[in-house]
Image (cartoon, rainbow, N blue to C red):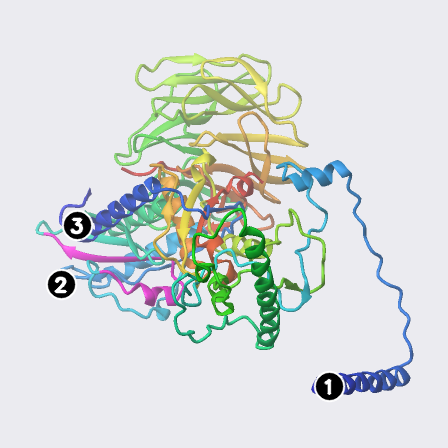
Amino acid sequence: MSKANPSMPPTVSRRRLIALGAGAAAGTLAGLAPRPAAAVLKLDVTQGNIQPMPIALPDFLVEPGVPDPGMGRSITQIITSNLRRSGLFAPIDQAAYLERITNINTQPRFADWRQINAQALVTGRLERQANGNVAAQFRLWDVFAAGHVHAQQTSTSPDNFRRIAHIISDQIYQRLTGEMGYFDTRIVFIDESGPRDRRMKRLAIMDQDGANVRYLTRGDDLVLTPRFSPSTQEITYMSYGQGQPRVYLLNIETGQREVVGNFPGMTFAPRFSHDGYRVIMSLQQGGNANIFVMDLRSRSTMKLTDTAAIDTAPSYSPDGSRICFESDRGGRQQIYVMGGNGGPASRISFGEGSYSTPVWSPRGDYIAFTKQAQGRFSIGIMRPDGSGERILTEGFHNEGPTWAPNGRVLMFFRDTGGNSGPHLYTVDVTGRNEQRIPTPAFGSDPAWSPLLR
Amino acid sequence: MKVGVTISTTAHIAVLVLATVTLTSAPPKITAPPPMSVALTTTSDESKLAAGVQNAPQSENPRPFVERVGENRPVEDPNAKVVENAKEVPAATDAAAPPPPPLPQPKQLPKKAEPKRDVIAEAIRKDNAKKSEQTKVAASPPLPPRRPLNAEPKFDRRKIEALLDKRTPQRREATGDAINNALALGAPAATAAQLTQNELDALRARLAQLWNPPAGAQNPQELVVAIRMRLKPDGTLAAPPMVMTSGQSPMFMAARDSAIRAVFRGQPFDMLRPETYEQWKDIEITFDPREMIRG
């Protein structure tokens, strides 16, 4: 997989550069010129209208030689569905398009795209490279400013074309929203099948859009709480393996599995630090549980809490300087924050009910949690100091939030009760745009990977 | 004279007839006059207002000065150019009078004024003639005239034209919905066509409707974008909008593009009246989403 932009003719961007230069020069001149008698009228606009941006995505052109001529349409459909699912874009039906794109290196007829109210336009082309790979070029256009915004070429083997679509989706998303994308990511989760009383739970992995499901365990052992490593293709999870529940490490690519640490009791609720070098978890000792951290390089362990309560579900802040966790030391389960090396902890959750499964956002600005109050489970976020609590979704049973790598979207699982089972959902940090993620059977305990590299 | 009398008589009769008809047919309606609101201001406030003190209190409901009821029109158009309407007429000189040129008629003067002015001119001339006779008599003993008599500036009524201001008058009758004799000192709409708050609100509303700012940023300051737009009188952009703030982050770029898009999509800004073009041809808009994101 290579990301490069060698063969794209730079004419358009150069023209744009010149235009920008001219604009800047005009600006400078205007600044130097004596101020005209009529002063500039100043106006503040402080309210906007946040709504999905209409975007046009005609099918990628396919050059002769590409093994599957349908690939252009497939890539466009994956991008379209990614953008639509994000809730920030409103892809326009292709039937409405007035201009048929035949060459992505010439400027489109912006008036035609304005006519159908498109604000952005994505054009692309696939061609076969000498080594058999497929190269995808795409261009992003701003329809109203009538300008070229972004271009890139990506190449990969033909059977990996879905990743190309995700990478392009991320670029469009990032350029137009300013946020990092999250489409080129994977989800590890617990696949649940069979009747409720004899449910088989397997560790599974899939693309964030639900495609390419792969099973990582056979379902012999009960598995729980898988978590992605932020830097390697590894996951950590808890399994009942041989009797005593233990925290394991699993390499997704090689299938290699190992127990984390050599603890006398049950270990659970593991999670990687954001640098990927440490695993933090709970160890049960008698009637209480304390938090331990293990350095994966030196294999040394350190005890971070020492209370007569159950301290669990630890999660590092992105810079590793703090840890949030849940504890019932005050009676009910609440969220506490302590330093990265342990020490005194301060309680941050004070609302009605109990709080559990705190997860620090990869951006550092929020901690997501599961809240239980009045027999209902909701997913919410609060700032690391406990302020600004906001419930994003509420219902019979919602649990186990996990952050998209850009810290803007959360995934969780929801069980509506009755004879059915849990399903995976996403919601964004504003509480809008709830979406169900398709899984082959029931799914629970999702964990979002970092962006693939 | 006779014509005037006839017209006057006819008009009076018409008014009387009309009054009789309407007053008899419609039952007299007595409605209480609407309550008048009177704003009390102190004398010191008044004097501050008059002196143009910057922080002087605003008068409660400032209304422009209106002399006659009619279509809204202020006294002066500050943007009107001074136009020389008539050819320059040479002032009276000692040289032999040239053949009388055709009298240039200032456009704005009604025709009726012509004979009137003649009469006055005649009178003045007579008067002047007398005066010059007197001065001649009085001045002659101590200071013998060195110049011949005929060199004395002679009044020539045709030469009066040279002294008249032949520019189009800029002072017009101030018209409006209701007569208001109070000079509107400090009233914002007192002079010229003024950009109204309504126009500004409509402009702001259109931009707010079309502006789709990026939803969240860790540093919301980078979402604030100032855009300067120069407009043509038809309300379309005269040039691509200029970005007055700078930044490098992807978030700033997204915010900047969203603001530019709103400006492009808002065209034409037809809520702005062409009469007030001078005031809105160059606008700097600050798009600041911090308030809306905070909630």
Amino acid of disc 2: Pro
Where residue A416 appears, as percent x and y from the top left, is: 58, 48
Q: Chain of mark 1?
A: B
Residue nearest the observer in this picture, A169 or B276: B276
Distance CA(mark 3)–CA(mark 2): 24 Å
Q: Viewed as shown, does residue B76 lie left or right of B246?
A: right
Can you tell which mark lies on residue A10? 3
**Dot 1 alpha-carbon crowd within 10 angstroms: few under 14, some 14 to 19, many 20 or more:** few
Q: Quadrant of the N terminus of chain B?
A: bottom right
Where residue A37 appears, as percent x and y from the top left, is: 44, 46
Can you tell which mark lies on residue B7? 1
The span picked out in magenta is A107-129
- Marks 3, 1 in one chain: no
Residue A307, by quadrant, is top right
Amino acid of disc 1: Ile
**Residue labelled with disc 2:** A64
- Marks 3, 2 in one chain: yes
Residue B181, by quadrant, is bottom right
Q: Quadrant of the C terminus of chain B?
A: top right
**Dot 3 alpha-carbon crowd within 10 angstroms: few under 14, some 14 to 19, many 20 or more:** few
Can you tell which mark lies on residue A438? none
Residue A99 visible: yes
Magenta region includes residue B227: no
Per the image, label 3 sits on a secondary structure element best described as loop
Q: Viewed as shown, does residue B295 lie left or right of B224?
A: right
Per the image, label 1 sits on a secondary structure element best described as helix
Distance CA(mark 3)–CA(mark 1): 83 Å
Q: Nearer the viewer, mark 1 or mark 2?
A: 1
Amino acid of disc 3: Pro
Compared to B170, does A413 lie above or below? Answer: above
Distance CA(mark 1)–CA(mark 2): 94 Å
